[in-house]
Image (cartoon, coloured by chain):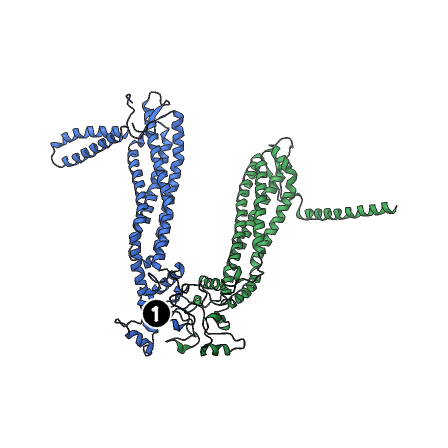
Amino acid sequence: MLLKITFTQQRRVRLAQGLWLMSWLAVMSGAFIFCLGVYLKTELLRRAEVMDNTEIHVVPNILMMVGLVSIGTNWVATRVCQDSLDASRFPRWKLLLMAWFTVAVLLCCLLLAVVVLSYALQGRLEESLKVGLRNGIRFYKDTDVPGRCFQKETIDRLQMEFRCCGNNNFKDWFEVQWVSNRYLDFTSKDVKDRIRSNVDGRYLLDGVPFSCCNPASPRPCLQYHLTDNSAHYSYDYQAEELNLYSRGCRQALTDYYMEMMNSTGPGVLSVILIQMSVLVSLRYLQTAVEGATALEDPEGESVGYLLEKGVKETFEDVKANVLNILKFAQVDPSAAEGSPGAEDAEKPADNTTEKAASPTPSPAS
Amino acid sequence: MALLPVKFDLKKRVKLAQTVWFMYWFAVLAGVLVLSMGLFFKIELRKRSELMDNNESHFLPNLLILMGLIACSINVFGGKVCYDSLDPEKFAKWKPMLKTYLVFCVGFNALLLVTALLCFLMRIPMQFTLAEGLRNGMRYYKDTDTPGRCYMKRTLDLMQIEFHCCGNDNYRDWFEIQWVSNRYLDFSSKEVRDRIGSNVDGQYLMDGVPFSCCNPSSPRPCIQAQMTNNSAHYSYDHYTEDLNVWKRGCRDALLSYYGGMMSTIGALVILVTMLEAGVTVGMQYVHSSLSNLANPEDPESESEGWLLEKTVKETFTDIMDKMKSMGKGSKVEEGEAAVETVS
């Protein structure tokens, strides 16, 4: 037996009560995980226009699913707790408990996977933002094209809110035509020069939109002729720091989302802890109560344990059961004469599964 | 004849006490709510204190905080008394204080109503405060090197971006002041000298606005400089241009923001006043029903509870008589002392 503990009737009652409270706590934490998932998802959806793909959405999706399942699972645990001290009502939970344990272990694994994923997907998020922002900057001027007419407002508001400029830095704006052709005077010499100065015939300028301006600058914002020191009084392009935002929007958004996901890390880990403790306590309660019902005096002492045999033996048993089930499934479609043999094979398999699910304390232990 | 009398047996008295105790706990929460609203309002005023005239009054949030604290304490006390009212021995020690407590509650409710009224009226002085403060703010926009004013530019820029407004009344306010610091003006240039020479005070005025006035919803890149010169920009008519800069003035924007906040707080305070009035009435019934049991020895006997012992008119005349007799009493004492000294 693995980690056995003796339980008196009073201790069993205490365990059941404590476990009932902890299960309700686990229900709350399940709701918390669900709300966390919803919050992350809404934040990601808010900026969906500057993201290229939705791979990062797997993190909030898993959180929401795990939250809902954990609410249901832990509610079942509270019902089991309530019935555990009533000898007539407890046996009906026997089969369900096996499934419950597997689901609980699965939930813990999924939560761990979420924590790992939120770090692992940072690279994919950056890629997605890079492509999305590049498109946003390219379509900035297309305020008359249906489907893209809000790009300008989106990018402007994004740059003002996150205090950033361009994709990597403000020079990204120098490489794109961000002034629409509708507002360019093609008869003017300056416009004609600029258009001829590059292969694609685009109107490129060394200027940025107003949303790049930094309000903390002591000087009114300089937006145009940024590389030309002589265009502005007492201006040095290399030394000017506060005029525009120096951070790129990709970096700003990545930092924002990473910080959000990292701050949820401790919460998720503590929920895993709560779920594991509910699982362990429920196992002890189940074995202790079953042990008590098997005794002549149901109010006497019983032994609770985690596993009936050692870890290795239990593993061998489970493997044998699974192989039997597989063999049974393989044998079944082949022949009818195989069926009586299959039935005989099924019975011992059933016995072993029953033994593993609800083991009675053997006199030897 | 008592005002609104109600007959009570033991069961009814117990139920009344329980209901009033429950209501008192809600009233405590309401008091906490008033306190937190006062704190919130105070913090909001502090946040933008640079944009308001120096003597903006914090009277209203301070009053709200005070009322919240008083409400919490009297409601906790009332709840305790209600809880004890079911036990005759415990109730006996509270009994003498109850009459003064109830009078104090009535006075407090009147004060709460006055506070709610003030919330709605404070809009008017706030308007003048904001107008003055914003005008000064804009004048000090360029003084980013003067200690004490160096953050005015950032404050104004962030405010215009957040509240979607420009200037005091509208964007033309920026045309009338110099918002570019002299440090960044090339005084050897002809254009600068022309502009400075063009007005009496020698200020560098331009028909341009800071970048924070720009509206992101405009389909066109923002036009900040030479706004009144149609020929300076291609396909531009400054009379019909709507979306280029924010059209609203910051005084209006801030006033509607604070006005909305104060109206909400005022409405909530009125609701709290009604709740307080309810618990006061309930407490009066508890007090009166326990004060005149039909059989004073038997706590389970029937009793009658009322709102006022006599009718309104009689109670009023009683109070007037009492006040007159107090005044006359002090006069008579003086007269007697005078007589004694004389004789």
Left or right: residue B144 compared with residue B279: left
Chain B appears what colour? green
Task: For mark 1, name the chain.
Answer: A
User: Can I make out residue B117 in this image?
Assistant: no
Query: Considering depth in this image, is B80 or A355 the residue closer to the camera?
Result: A355
Q: Residues within 10 Å of mark 1 (few under 14, many from 20)?
A: some
Tell me where residue B251 appears, x and y as whole percent: 51, 65
Q: Secondary structure at mark 1?
A: loop
Viewport quadrant of the N terminus of chain B: top right
Please report the residue visible at 61 percent of the width from the left and 34 percent of the height from the top. B90
Left or right: residue B307 compared with residue A264: right
Tell me where residue A40 appears, x and y as whole percent: 36, 51
Please report the residue visible at 40 percent of the width from the left and 60 percent of the height from the top. A163
User: Can I make out residue B76 in this image?
Assistant: yes
Q: For residue B9, what is the image quadrant?
A: top right
Viewport quadrant of the C terminus of chain B: top right
Left or right: residue A231 compared with residue A123: right
Identify by letter the chain in blue.
A
Name the amino acid, label 1. Asp
Please report the residue visible at 45 percent of the width from the left and 77 percent of the height from the top. B189
Query: Considering depth in this image, is B312 or B122 the residue closer to the camera?
Result: B122
Tell me where residue A283 appears, x and y as whole percent: 33, 32
Left or right: residue A321 compared with residue A365: left
Against A289, residue B45 (above or below) is below
Tell me where residue A220 appears, x and y as whole percent: 44, 68
Against B140, residue B113 (above or below) is above
Q: For residue A176, what is the image quadrant?
A: bottom left
Please report the residue visible at 64 percent of the width from the left and 38 percent of the height from the top. B95
Q: For residue B300, what is the image quadrant?
A: top right
Against A178, residue B232 (above or below) is below
Question: Residue at label 1?
Answer: A206
Query: Considering depth in this image, is A69 or B225 the residue closer to the camera?
Result: B225
